[in-house]
Amino acid sequence: MTSSTPSYDVVVVGGGIVGLATAHAVARTGRSVAVVEREPRLAAHQTGNNSNVIHSGLYYAPGGYKARLAVAGCAETIAFCREHDLPHERTGKLVVATDPEELPRMAELKRRGDANGVENHELDQAGMREHEPHVRGIAALYVPSTGITDYRAVAEKIGELVAKEGGEIHLGRPVRQILPRASDVVVRTEAGDLLGKQVVVCAGLRCDEVAKAAGVDPGVRIVPFRGEYSGFSDRAAELVKGLIYPVPDPAFPFLGVHATRGVDGSVHAGPNAVLALAREGYSWGTVKPKEFLETITYPGMLKIAKKHWKYGFGEMHRSLSRSAMVKQIQRMLPDVRAEDLHRAGAGVRAQAVKADGTLVDDFLFVEQAGSGGLGAPGSVLHVLNAPSPAATAALPIGREILEKLTGEKLAPLTAS
Ligand SMILES: Cc1cc2nc3c(=O)[nH]c(=O)nc-3n(C[C@H](O)[C@H](O)[C@H](O)COP(=O)(O)OP(=O)(O)OC[C@H]3O[C@@H](n4cnc5c(N)ncnc54)[C@H](O)[C@@H]3O)c2cc1C
């Protein structure tokens, strides 16, 4: 390291939507900031390969980060898209129960929605058909505030604003090591070092690996769960007006295979949840034996496999068999046929799992104190679980992280 090593108030590792929103919050306060991203472009992983739904905050345990930050993020994302002329639409969504066994879970969703201040309405069969004429179910919740956008476009716009406010974005620079010192932190990349008074790690599928490279035991392991999408034919797309979701299984932090009309008008169903064979394992063909071995020998993963093997095999079967996938979709949309579906890409979720097999439900922030203490120069903040709805919640997450770093509270962005 030399006296010419570039130096910033904050260095953010990861150019997904959470890292970019964090850099944006920092830049809004006039502090200097750099984002360091390993890929040659922004939003290359979860942010650019998701369902593009602006979540309302319906599902999440009241009082947690997800509940608070998704509700705020839903309004803020819409305001941001409006302000910057980005594609978005407030479509509303239906959560549909297809089996009487799901009714108590739907009642719990309603209770959570009410506690989180999310407008929602119970509908009977006639009511649900007014919103979605082709849906089949026994009862539904309608949530008007849910919407759709294009998170890659949102992330790229946030990146543009960071640069406009004087921040720097370094692409194609994997971070290999983080060395906290007395009054700053060295961020070591293949293309040279950067210095941050403080560092924030938002490395998604590799956040636990980067935590270890900073000398921290993250206490969790990222298990990559691939979510595959099926595109609908033009005929089947006519059957879906907006967003149609099942009642989720409370054993998993996933929302179940849903049908979504995107901002480009196309309709897709997904994502399922299959164990990926590499951290960035976007298809069955992407296998990294070392990473896969590390995942399946992790005690937490072994516990999940023991408890949920039936569910896991079911998801694998639906991944490999179009007829199995169509059966699942037909529970809510009986007129969809196997020939209506085609493969339409995938995303990989970075799900933090504890050694006892618990899938971490809420967002998880772990602060690594420098010698000056937490929040002081020399400290590192690790975002160790930011799955869905973190794209929706990214702007408030960025402000939350800024407050953890500096104690400074920023006002939300609103459309002018
Ligand atoms: C299938 C799927 C569907 C989803 N649907 C929705 C949805 O509809 N609505 C919603 O709100 N959320 C959804 N989510 C969740 C949402 O996409 C994520 O919560 C969000 O994108 C997380 O953003 P992030 O910045 O933390 O992670 P990422 O977007 O994954 O970004 C992390 C970045 O860190 C970089 N990185 C990793 N290691 C290093 C390193 N060593 N050095 C430098 N950079 C590094 C990566 O290259 C990556 O660009 C979905 C996710 C998936 C996978």
Image (cartoon, rainbow, N blue to C red):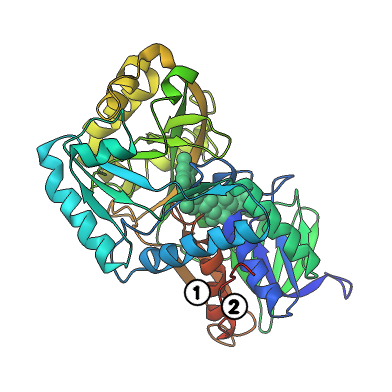
Mark 2: which secondary structure? loop
Task: Say whether residue 352 is visible.
Answer: yes
Disc 1: which residue: 367
Which residue is farthest left?
100
Residue 120 in the image: state x and y as whole percent. Answer: 29, 56
Q: Is residue 82 left or right of residue 34?
A: left
Are discs 1 and 2 less than 8 Å apart at CB? yes
The x and y percentages for residue 298 are: 37, 46
Of the numbered discs 1 and 2, the one sitting upstream in the chain is 1
State the image coordinates of residue 378 (x, y, percent, origin top left). 64, 80
Quadrant into which the N terminus falls: bottom right
Left/right of residue 404 with respect to residue 169 in the rendered view: left
Report crowding for label 2: few under 14, some 14 to 19, many 20 or more residues within 10 A (C-alpha): many
User: At x 25% / y 64%, what residue is drawn?
Assistant: 114
Q: Residue furthest top?
A: 339
Q: On the picture, is 411 further left or further right than 27?
A: left
Question: Quick one: quadrant of the C terminus?
Answer: bottom right
- What type is the residue that disc 1 sits on? Glu
Report the Cα–Cα distance between label 1 and label 2.
Answer: 7 Å
Residue lying at 15% horizontally and 42% vertically, measured from the top left: 102
Q: In this view of the protein, can residue 306 be seen by the observer?
A: no
**Residue 288 versus residue 79: which sits nearer the camera?**
79
Q: Which mark is residue 379?
A: 2
Q: Amino acid at mark 2?
A: Ser
